[in-house]
Image (spheres, rainbow, N blue to C red):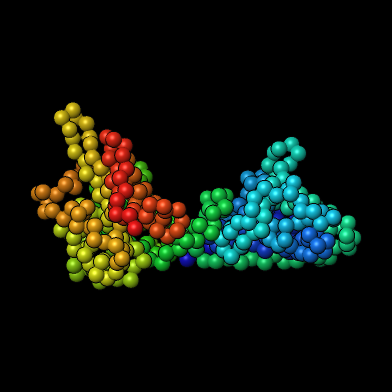
């Protein structure tokens, strides 16, 4: 696993704050954070006590602060700052307490835009804009208080190992570090890397799962280029193994991807013991039955996906996307909703369309994220069907 170090020497705005004596704490985990400790603030009891100013820290792929600042907001850790009379400075407060992830929990959020409504030019300007407002009130009561030390204070950097080869700024910009941390699964497998399975990988690769294991014995052939993520060049279509082709794409973004260039049969089932979760995306009904029954026996939760598409008398495609969840606690519905028919009678035809594969994958990964607590889940269904022609979505086997 890796982490991109924050480069203060190439971030003059952060380096200037450090040189001025501010106590900077830079935290890199699920998101990137900037904390300025020791800011004098007035409490409701009229005392001057130190608090912590917080803002998300946007950095580029080599760890340099990105300017101008995309977010004008800051947050506070400590009792909400008051003016010199002990009145809470409500004119600054825009948000209640928030969990920013990585152990950082704020008390209130501030919103203070520049007078000309443009973005702050850099973090030095932004931090000073908020510090002045809070510190000014504290100086009324204590003329000697100061958020700065009399000499430069080396910034404290806390970096947690993550799988990504560059910082996850999508999480940082959105301020959802606490939610994203819920996706820190240890080991997840994808069985089958065809249309739906490859899109499942595309979505899971962008989460902080420690290990992603890919199981598929097939080659990446010409038709796969039209139902998988990305756009391979003609000269690249040399029939590599699917696991190798997709590894080459996503290894550029993250570590922790493991290739298993073979199909999962009964003899491979023991390899799946101990996985946190498994996604099954295959069209072999016999193999599906063996795998699902084996996962249940090992008490490994899973999602099985499939699409059923046919051509009607008008030459239009009709069908459904299916997502079925099973856990050791709830799995009785499998026999009713998943096809285990033989190949010649299997309802899972070999019509694969990229947008349906992508939708099938999105439904599956969204459901997994619900199970992890990332998304809210009021229905808690264990089986869903999306019907193309009616644009209908059924939700069954609710818990």
Quarter of image, res 287: bottom left
**Who's the residue at 88% across and 60% down the image?**
141
Foreground residue among 321 and 270: 321
Q: Do we see residue 188 in this rendering?
A: yes
Q: In which quarter of the image is residue 286?
A: bottom left
Percent position of residue 347, x then y: 16, 47
Can you give x and y, in whole percent of width and height, for residue 9 in the image?
Answer: 68, 58
Q: Can see residue 240?
A: no
Most extreme residue toward the top is 314
Residue 52 x %, y %: 71, 61
User: What residue sits 28% from the left and 35% below the top?
Assistant: 390
Query: Residue 140 or 82: which is nearer the viewer?
Result: 82
Q: Which residue is more in the foreground, 321 or 28?
A: 321
Q: Is residue 161 above or below residue 88?
A: below
Quick check: 166 left or right of 49? left
Question: Which sits in the foreground, 142 or 264?
Answer: 142
- Position above or below: 261 against 389: below
Number of numbered labels in the structure image: 0
Quarter of the picture holding the C terminus: bottom left
Give the image location of residue 99, x and y in percent.
Answer: 58, 59
Q: Which residue is drawn at 79% across and 65% down?
A: 49
Classify 1 as above or below 241: below
* Residue at horizontal 31 percent and vertical 37 percent from the top: 391
> Among all residues in the image, which is located at the extreme left?
344
Name the image quarter holding residue 295: bottom left
Relative placement, left or right, of 366 versus 162 is left
């Amino acid at each position: 696993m890796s982490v991109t170090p924050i480069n203060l020497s190439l971030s003059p705005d952060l380096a200037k704050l450090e040189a001025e004596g501010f106590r900077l704490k830079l935290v890199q985990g699920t998101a990137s954070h900037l904390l300025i400790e020791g800011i004098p603030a007035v409490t409701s009891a009229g005392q001057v006590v130190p608090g912590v100013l917080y803002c998300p820290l946007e950095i580029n792929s080599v760890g340099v602060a990105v300017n101008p600042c995309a977010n004008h907001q800051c947050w506070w850790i400590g009792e909400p700052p008051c003016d010199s009379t002990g009145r809470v400075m409500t004119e600054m407060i825009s948000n209640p307490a928030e969990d920013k992830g990585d152990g950082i929990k704020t008390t209130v959020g501030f919103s203070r835009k520049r007078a000309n409504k443009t973005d702050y030019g850099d973090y030095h300007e932004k931090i000073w804009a908020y510090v002045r407002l809070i510190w000014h009130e504290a100086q009324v009561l204590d003329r000697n208080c100061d958020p700065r030390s009399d000499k430069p204070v080396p910034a404290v950097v806390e970096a947690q190992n993550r799988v990504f080869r560059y910082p996850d700024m999508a999480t940082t910009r959105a301020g959802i570090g606490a939610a994203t941390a819920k996706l820190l699964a240890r080991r997840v497998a994808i069985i089958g890397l065809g249309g739906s399975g490859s899109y499942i990988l595309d979505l899971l690769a962008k989460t902080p799962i420690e290990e992603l294991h890919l199981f598929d014995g097939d080659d990446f052939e010409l038709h796969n280029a039209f139902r998988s993520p990305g756009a391979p060049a003609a000269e690249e279509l040399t029939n590599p193994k699917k696991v190798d082709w997709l590894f080459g794409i996503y290894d550029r973004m993250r570590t922790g991807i493991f290739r298993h260039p073979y199909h999962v049969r009964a003899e491979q089932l023991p390899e799946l013991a101990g996985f946190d979760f498994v996604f099954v995306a295959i069209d072999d009904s016999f193999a599906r039955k063996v795998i699902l029954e084996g996962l249940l026996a090992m008490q490994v939760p899973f999602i099985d996906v499939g699409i059923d598409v046919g051509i009607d008398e008008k030459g239009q495609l009709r069908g459904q996307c299916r997502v079925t969840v099973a856990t050791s606690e709830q799995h009785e519905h499998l026999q009713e909703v998943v096809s285990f028919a033989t190949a010649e009678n299997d309802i899972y035809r070999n019509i694969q369309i990229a947008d349906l594969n992508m939708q099938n994958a999105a439904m599956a990964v969204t459901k997994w994220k619900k199970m992890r607590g990332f998304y809210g889940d009021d229905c808690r269904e264990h089986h869903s069907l999306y019907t193309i022609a009616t644009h209908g979505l059924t939700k069954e086997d609710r818990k």
